[in-house]
Amino acid sequence: MTQIKFGTSGWRGILCDEFTLENVRVVTQAIADYLHDQGLTEKGVVVGYDARFMGKDFARETVRVLAGAGIKAYLCNRDTPTPVISHELIRRQAAGAINFTASHNPYDYNGIKFSPAWGGPALPETTGDIEKRANAMLGEIVFKDMPLDEADRKGLFEEIDPREDYFTTLRGLIDFAAIEKSGIKVAVNPLFGSGRGYLDRLLREAGVDIVTMNDHLDPYFGGEPPEPAEAHIQDFIELIRSDAAINLGVATDGDADRFGIVDSDGSYIEPNYILALLFDYMIRTKGMKGNAARSVATSHLIDAVAAFHGVDVLETPVGFKFIGEYISENKILIGGEESAGLSIQGHVPEKDGILACLMVAEMVAVEKKSLRQLLNDLYSRVGEIYTKRINIRLSSDVEGGLPAKFANPPKQIGGRDVVQVIQIDGNKYLFDDGSWMLFRKSGTEPVVRLYSEAKTEGRMKELLDLGQKFILD
């Protein structure tokens, strides 16, 4: 029987294989038992789901199990973005949130993401506890459920619409007047996901000229993974290239916690660059001050911005839960990951692709420049940095030898001294010229993810070659 395993952002599995109603009931009961032991059951749980197959069915089944355990559920009335669920959890001061989402994974996946009361993704000690409880109960009838009508009569079930309170918060964070005044035209692409009716509605209500695509419900996500990466949004890029009046393209993933940004000429702008641009904009133009946090795999361009403005950068393992913890403790101005997740001070400790897209729209409107122009301006102040990630597929022999290879870091690679080794998540080697490479083994397949970064494009490509040779030789 498949074991329950929470990854960097919850437990995910293929529908009808690992991810079944039976396993969902077991995991829900494990969460209920955890909340009982924490003494938090009186505060209730927010329950939501994204635009995937059976999301609403799974969510309603979870409500039944929670009610059977005597825990009230606040069920979102439609598919809902992950950051909106986090916002509602904090606003209600609930005990936690159970969110059915597989984020940017293909259509045949679903997942459960549990967020504790502080609003960010659960930290490893929490998910480890829930995992242990769930796996001990697999194959047994360990839960009792309650029909929804009975749960409603007993005050253990309430349907909610969390949108308006979330919109109110965003209106306090984003200068919509500046966006409208600029007269920019914005293309919006929610990728058939739960971001429908969020970016488009907020911008329209502010009087912004927008054009939308892929803004209807489709659990197949148009045949592509609902990830706003360049490879999956070619139709969006072509739309922007075909309309010279469009100044900016903004996209969100399946649960709207990740962002994708396209410049006015149809150029896809990597998330690493967006993080650094927004950090610089918040300090230089908006007059804000504070440190940043980034994952170990994220570009050091944000470090260069921090050094230029005299602030610090905190480095975390991969997984937004670690950055979210800094947000919740008010320790940083902005936090982000190279995988297109960010949040800011005063907002939810969770990735928010809707917020990110609106911040970019504000930056373009206020600065009156394209993103490429803004990036060139930034390079002129802090220096150029180039970054890239590739996947290295492993044979069984190579995979078996990796632990020993990583346990003994080299003193040199390609004739350059390794001046620092960072092992908070994978193996990151920093070189004497300021460049670096990072190896992270996939937890689900025989793949090593190789990241490289340097001050020139040639050196970046050289590191990719050296990194592949280091792994495969």
Image (spheres, helix red, strand yellow):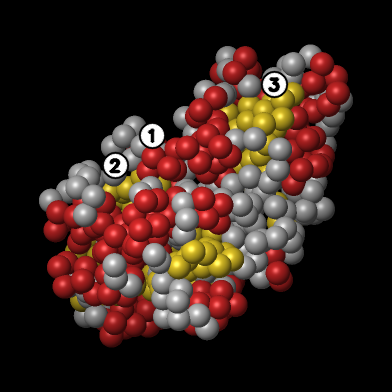
Residue 241, relative to residue 260: is it above or below?
Answer: below
Q: Secondary structure at mark 3?
A: loop
Q: Residue at x 67, y 28 (%)?
A: 74
* Residue labelled with disc 2: 332
Residue 459, relative to residue 331: is it above or below?
Answer: below
Q: Secondary structure at mark 1?
A: helix
* Residue 324 appears in the picture as rendered: no
Q: Nearer the viewer, residue 298 or 212?
A: 212
* Residue labelled with disc 3: 72
User: What percent of the width, then of the height, locates residue 38?
Assistant: 56, 18
Gap between marks 1 and 2 measured at Cα: 9 Å
Image disc number at residue 376: none
* Residue type pointed to by label 1: Ser
Q: Residue at x 85, y 19 (%)?
A: 150
* Residue labelled with disc 1: 328
Gap between marks 3 and 1 measured at Cα: 25 Å
